[in-house]
Image (cartoon, rainbow, N blue to C red):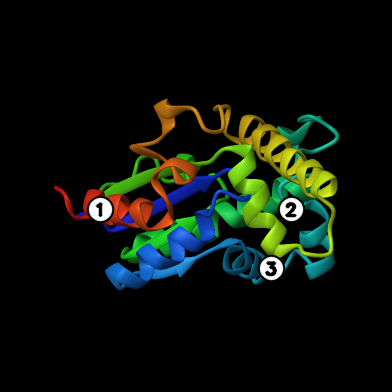
């Protein structure tokens, strides 16, 4: 059985919903952005406002002398990424967990008994899901937000992991929630996790 499941996802594709349901069904610990950021703040060098400001954004200064400085002198977002990476590893070391986002698939690529999942969906499906969650926003604004979040995730992934967000080479299983439906995605992931 795979006892560490990572879920990467397009914004609005249902990754968090699916991840939580998979964790519930398997009796695993569920770890999402908020839990990882909380653990990153507990390292003591980052304030909540700093974390919110730089979460999933690529540094403006690409690597300027970073190797010359220690952890506390690195650009804040580099410190945040490192703190998140350590938090993800701590969760993974305990096993029996579902970790959503934060490039956990790459951070944990050397770990045994892992299942790395990518969840995508059509833009239309994602728009309709987010309209329910953001009833006060226009369709145009929601679409703009969808595209912006996806673009930011792609840049963040490329900068910190030197990989391509959503590229099948970095996942064990890729599911399309708009085609399969949320429930079938949950079933497929649980079945894959139970295989040897």
Q: Nearer the viewer, mark 1 or mark 3?
A: 1
The residue singled out by tag 1 in the image is 193
- Relative placement, left or right, of 181 versus 60 is left
Which image quadrant for residue 97? bottom left
Q: Residues within 10 Å of mark 1 (few under 14, many from 20)?
A: many
- Residue position for label 2: 55
**Considering the numbered disc 3 on the image, is that residue within a helix, a strand or a loop?**
helix
Which element is circle 1 on? helix
| Among numbered discs 1 and 2, the one appearing first in the sequence | 2
Q: Where does the image place residue 95, in percent across and percent down from the top left? A: 32, 63
Q: Position of residue 78 (x, y in %)?
A: 71, 45
In the displayed structure, would residue 17 be above or below residue 185?
A: below
Quarter where residue 41 is shown: bottom right
Crowding near the residue tagged with mark 3, few <14, some 14–19, many ≥20 C-alpha atoms within 10 Å: some
Q: Quadrant of the N terminus?
A: bottom left
Q: Which mark is residue 41?
A: 3
């Amino acid at each position: 059985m795979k006892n560490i499941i990572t879920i990467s996802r397009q914004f609005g594709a249902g990754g968090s919903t699916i991840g939580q349901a998979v964790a519930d069904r398997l009796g695993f610990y569920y770890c999402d952005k908020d839990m990882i950021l909380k653990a990153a703040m507990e390292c003591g060098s980052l304030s909540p406002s700093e974390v919110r400001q730089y979460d999933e954004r690529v540094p403006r200064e690409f690597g300027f002398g970073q190797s010359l400085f220690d952890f506390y002198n690195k650009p804040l977002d580099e410190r945040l990424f490192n703190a998140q990476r350590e938090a993800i590893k701590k969760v993974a070391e305990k096993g029996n967990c579902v970790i959503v986002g934060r490039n956990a698939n790459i951070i944990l690529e050397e770990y045994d008994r892992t299942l790395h999942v990518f969840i995508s969906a059509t833009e239309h499906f994602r728009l309709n899901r987010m309209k329910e969650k953001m009833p006060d926003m226009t369709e145009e604004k929601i679409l703009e937000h969808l595209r912006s979040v996806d673009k930011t995730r792609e840049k963040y992934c490329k900068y910190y992991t030197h990989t391509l967000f959503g590229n099948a080479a970095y996942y064990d299983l890729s599911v399309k929630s708009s085609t399969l439906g949320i429930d079938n995605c949950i079933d497929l992931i649980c079945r894959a996790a139970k295989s040897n």
